[in-house]
Amino acid sequence: MDRYFIINKPHNMVSQFVSSHPVRLLGELDFDFPEGTHAIGRLDNDSEGLLILTTNKKVTRLLFQGKAPHERTYLVRVKGIMSEATLQRLKDGVAICVAEGQEYITTPCRVNIVDRPPGLFDHPRELPNNAPHTWLTITLTEGKFHQVRKMVGAVHHRCQRLIRVSIEDLLLGDLQPGEVKEFAEEEFFSLLKIDDYKD
C-alpha cells in the first residue's frame, strides 16, 4: 500500500534522499520514511515549505501532467516596497529566461501584497522588519524552473524568502520546519483535487 506525506521543508535542505554533493538531505529529518519514498514538485535548497513525499510513482504524472492545472501558492518576501503598477505586471505576466537565450512569458496569475503572517517560523537569514521589503502571495498553475524567483527578479525585486504554503487544498498550515504529516490516500487525492487516481 502506498503512503503519502507532506513536510515543511526547511531552508538549506535539498528535496532528495541521495546526493553526491555535501548537502542536507531529507533522510536527516526525524522520521522513518518507507523504502521508495520520493519528493514530488521539488523545492530548491533555499526555498521552504510544503513538499509532498510519497511511495506512489504515479503522483507526479497525476499532479503535473494531467488535463487540469493545479494551483500552488507561495508566500514571498522581496526586497524593497512593491508598487501597485509592479504588482499588476506580475499578475499580467512577465518575461523570464527559461533557457540560454530563451524567454518565456508567464501565464497571468494571482498576486497580492500581504502582511507577514503572525507566528511564521523564523528564517536564519531573514533581515529585520525595518529593512524595506514587501510580502506577497503568488498563486500559479505552472512551475518553470525557479519561476517565482525569476518573476520577482524580472520586476527588479530580489527574492529574500520563498515558502510554498499550499498545493490546491493541501495546506502547509502550522507544520513547523522539518515536521512531517501523513495522509490517507483518499484524503490526499481529494485535497489535491485529483479524482482519477485509481484509473
Image (tube, helix red, strand yellow):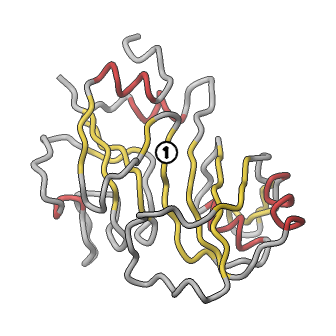
Residue 194 at x, y percent in the picture: 48, 22
Q: State the residue at coordinates (41%, 64%).
A: 119
- Quarter occupied by residue 95: bottom right
Please rate how many residues cluster around mark 1, counting C-alpha atoms within 10 Å: few if below 14, some from 14 to 19, many from 20: many
Q: Which residue is at the front of the view, 81 or 51?
A: 81
The N terminus sits in image quarter: top left
Rendered position, 195 above or below 51: above
Residue 22 at x, y percent in the picture: 25, 78
Element assignment for label 1: strand
Left or right for 117, reference 137: left
Picture mark count: 1
Q: State the residue at coordinates (60%, 49%).
A: 143
* Amino acid type at image mark 1: Ser
Residue furthest toward the front?
A: 118
Would you name the residue on which mark 1 appears?
166
Residue furthest toward the top?
A: 199
Rendered position, 54 above or below 139: above
The C terminus sits in image quarter: top left
Residue 122 at x, y percent in the picture: 39, 74
Left or right for 158, reference 24: right
Q: State the residue at coordinates (64%, 41%).
A: 141
Residue furthest toward the right?
A: 85
Q: Which residue is at the front of the view, 93 or 88?
A: 88
Q: Which residue is at the front of the view, 109 or 45?
A: 109
Residue 128 at x, y percent in the picture: 52, 87
- Quarter occupied by residue 170: top left
Residue furthest toward the left?
A: 32
